[in-house]
Amino acid sequence: MTHATLDGKTAVVTGGGRGIGRSVALGLAEEGMHLVLAARSEDEIEVAAEEIRDGGGEALAVPTDVTDTDDVTRLFERARERFGQVDLLVNNAGTNASGKLWELSDEAWERVVDVNLNGAFRCAREALAGGMVERGEGTIVNMSSLTGKVGFAGTSAYGASKHGLQGLTNTLAKELKDTDIRVSTVCPGQVATDLTDDIAEVDRLEAEDVTDIVVFLATRPAGVYVPEVVAVPPDSIPVVYH
């Protein structure tokens, strides 16, 4: 089987201004991809886009709130206007609301689900309807979490949204089984980012570890189905789930 090449293709990365998203964007640019970076913070994604351009790549920063359908539509319109088509979507935008279930407000719960799950739905729908289905090819990588598989106290909204993202991925893969559109989730353990700075110290992955997985998923042969990749530090206690 021939592995796909990423050179000259286009990726949309949500949450692309910092942490995992920024690392993924820079890693894909090193593979020769054109990058469209999306996040609510225009300053962050513009800095990341400028870094890509300074390295000789092409990048477009598009301020986007993935909870707003019009914003998501505009994001993909801008991507297609600039680069012609979207070949890879990395649904990485995410947020959290800490606290036990009975401590969460409706607003906190709904915000987490709307960003982490509904945002991925909106972006995937636009990527598929806007070209991938017609071409019969493309790649969608949904950034889930180990929390979505095993659950951790104080993360009920986050865990539910990430578990839902895995269900969305599995269903979408079946809907697209007769095409060369590949859909996968990445389920990392705790990654060293700004989002985890205030969490108790444990063995952590680096953002670059997750980047390597995304590149692997984007370049694997179209006929090879990888529904999910669970990534934990090598010295962690083995993960057991039912």
Image: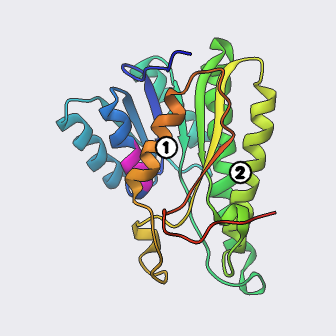
- The answer, for residue 242, to whether it is visible in the render is yes
Q: In this view, does 85 lie to the left or right of 37?
A: right
Q: Residue 165 in the image: state x and y as whole percent.
A: 71, 51
Residue 135 lies in quadrant: top right
Q: Which structural element holds mark 1? A: helix
> In the picture, which quadrant includes the C terminus?
bottom right
Q: Residue 41 in the image: state x and y as whole percent.
A: 40, 56
Answer above or below: position of 106 versus 200: above
Q: Which structural element holds mark 2? A: helix
Residue drawn at (61%, 21%) of the image? 222
Q: Is residue 152 left or right of residue 138?
A: right
Q: In this view, does 111 lie to the left or right of 20?
A: right
Q: Tell me where the magenta segment starts and ends, as one range.
A: 20-24
Residue drawn at (37%, 27%) of the image? 33
Instruction: Count residues near mark 2 (Cα–Cα under 10 Å), then give few for <14, some for 14-19, many for 20+.
Output: many
Answer above or below: position of 91 versus 139: below
Q: Nearer the viewer, residue 205 or 55?
A: 205
Marks 1 and 2, Cα distance to the nearest angstrom? 18 Å
> In the picture, which quadrant includes the N terminus?
top right
> What number is the disc on residue 38?
none
Q: In this view, does 54 lie to the left or right of 161?
A: left
Answer above or below: position of 171 versus 43: above
> What number is the disc on residue 165?
2
Residue drawn at (62%, 54%) of the image? 144
Whether residue 132 appears in magenta in the rendering, the answer is no
Q: Which residue has dot 1 on it?
A: 213
Say which amino acid is labelled 1. Answer: Ile
Q: Residue 139 in the image: state x and y as whole percent.
A: 58, 29
Answer above or below: position of 59 versus 39: above
